[in-house]
Amino acid sequence: MTVLTLIWVVLPFLLGFVIYLLPKGDRYLSLFGAFTSALYVIPLFVQQTPINLQLLDNFGVSLTLDPLAGFFILTNALVTAAVIIYCWHSDLTAFFYAQVILLHGSVNAAFACSDFISLYVALEVISIASFLLIAYPRSDRTIWIGLRYLFVSNVAMLFYLIGAVLVYKATHSFTFSGLRGAPPEAIALIFLGLLAKGGIFVSGLWLPLTHAESDSPVSALMSGVVVKAGVLPLLRCALLIAEIDPIVRVFGVSTALLGVSFAVFEQDTKRLLAFSTVSQMGFILAAPAVGGFYALTHGLVKASLFLTVSRLPSRNFKELQQQSIPRNIWIALVIAGFSISGFPLLAGFGAKILTLKNVLSWQDVGMNVAAVGTAIALAKFIFLPHYSPVEAQPAQRKTEFWVAIAILLGGLFVANVGYYEAYSLENAIKPLVTIAIGWLAYGLIFGNVSVNLPVAFEEFENLIGCMALILVLLFWMAIS
């Protein structure tokens, strides 16, 4: 299994290089890379035995592959495959597909790493590949959005790297477990970098504009898998070191509430989905032991939503409410919205139940409020007017679109089997009541309210200031 793991890590980077040499095979080679990742995770779930690799002693690379990482890797495989199929007959060049598979490989590497230096390298490669995909249209707007993302990411990782050096100075090791003997400032610096990369709390307010202004396939990748590269290391640290668990849970609750507070008032479809991603990262962190399953369901849902909203005639909800959308598009939105809201028969139901059963008592109120807020936000899609088209839609790439959506939404039905014990009368009532409250609140209040949300904290110059404030907060929490 060791040799197989090393081949799996290297393969996407090799495929990316081959695509440059054989550009006519770009789609097939990139899809093959995503397919191999889906196959690789099967033994992780079947054997349930973690794979721990230590290369070059404490100075080298530490890899940990277990069922927790398996959920994240499977998410990466399915979302990447869906995006490649979605773009199959587009006019995108081999450069785009090469960057997609390189991004796929670097995200896989980040999920596998269990030492801070290897993780740093993987996260930096993710930043470069993401920048190139964001800026791919080469318009002034996308280039600026990409540079903004790259600069914020690099500043965050500079703090992270200083923290990693402090960990080594204290423990003579770069492994995650070295945080146990590290000084508080090392924990604060490393967590600041991971919070920013994962779109967590105010450190992640770069995310809404970046995801909203990128092309839909790139938004699907960013929201479905890229931000999770900063989340999984936080989960691992929380599971390894008991003193860090409360810090991760606090940021989980606060992030869930922050994201949903913006999402319920947002009138732009892609910005709503981006703020929802911020909120859902909080749900993943709120219960570290079961965060992997929630990450899988969220990745499938959010990728499908970003791909589907690209087929809507407008991004403005006020305009969409004045015109009908095709019923088949509406059904795709409804299935995804039901899942992320926690409706039974979809994987989001089991993920929601599993998460809420594993939160601590002091988290209950905040997480239930966030769950109601999620139902309110997604109701904006569910209650859009719709019609049954008389004839086939003339839009190009229709088949590829539905194959991609089938992979993502089909995964929600299949993954639903993974937590079948959640289906009891008691478990089913609570999410249904939560959804009903959310829909009622939407119909009576939020559906008729128009609020201009403040964007000051999203401005470029304020993002770095927010990082400084979070660093002070993290330092105080680490000392406590």
Image: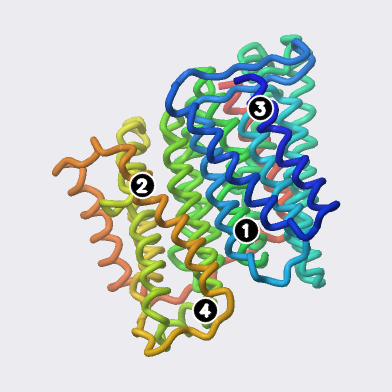
Q: Where residue 258 sits in the image (x, y, percent)?
A: 49, 52
Q: Which image quarter is the C terminus in?
A: top right
Q: Give the residue number, with chain letter if any, for mark 4.
A: 316
**Which amino acid does the dot numbered 2 rest on?**
Val
> Under tag 4, what secondary structure?
loop
N-terminal-most mark, 2 or 4: 4
Q: Give the residue number, with chain letter if any, for mark 3.
A: 113
N-terminal-most mark, 3 or 1: 1
The residue under the point 69% across, 32% down is 9
Q: Give the residue number, with chain letter if any, for mark 1.
A: 84
**Which amino acid does the dot numbered 4 rest on?**
Asn
**Distance between the Cα atoms at labels 4 and 1?**
27 Å
N-terminal-most mark, 2 or 1: 1
Q: Nearer the viewer, mark 4 or mark 1?
A: 1
N-terminal-most mark, 3 or 4: 3
Q: Judge the density around disc 3: few (<14), some (14-19), many (≥20) Cα neighbours within 10 Å.
A: many
**Distance between the Cα atoms at labels 2 and 3?**
28 Å
Q: Nearer the viewer, residue 71 or 185?
A: 71
> Under tag 3, what secondary structure?
loop
Q: Where residue 20 sits in the image (x, y, percent)?
A: 84, 53
The residue under the point 36% across, 42% down is 351
**Distance between the Cα atoms at labels 3 and 4?**
40 Å
Q: Which image quarter is the N terminus in?
A: top right
Q: Which mark is residue 414?
A: 2
Q: Judge the density around disc 1: few (<14), some (14-19), many (≥20) Cα neighbours within 10 Å.
A: many
Q: Where residue 474 sits in the image (x, y, percent)?
A: 62, 32
On screen, 169 above or below 34? above
Left or right placement of residue 155 versus residue 315 in this view: right
N-terminal-most mark, 2 or 3: 3
On screen, 202 above or below 373? above
Is there a contact, CB below 8 Å, between mark 3 and mark 4? no
Q: Which of marks 2 and 3 is in front?
A: 2
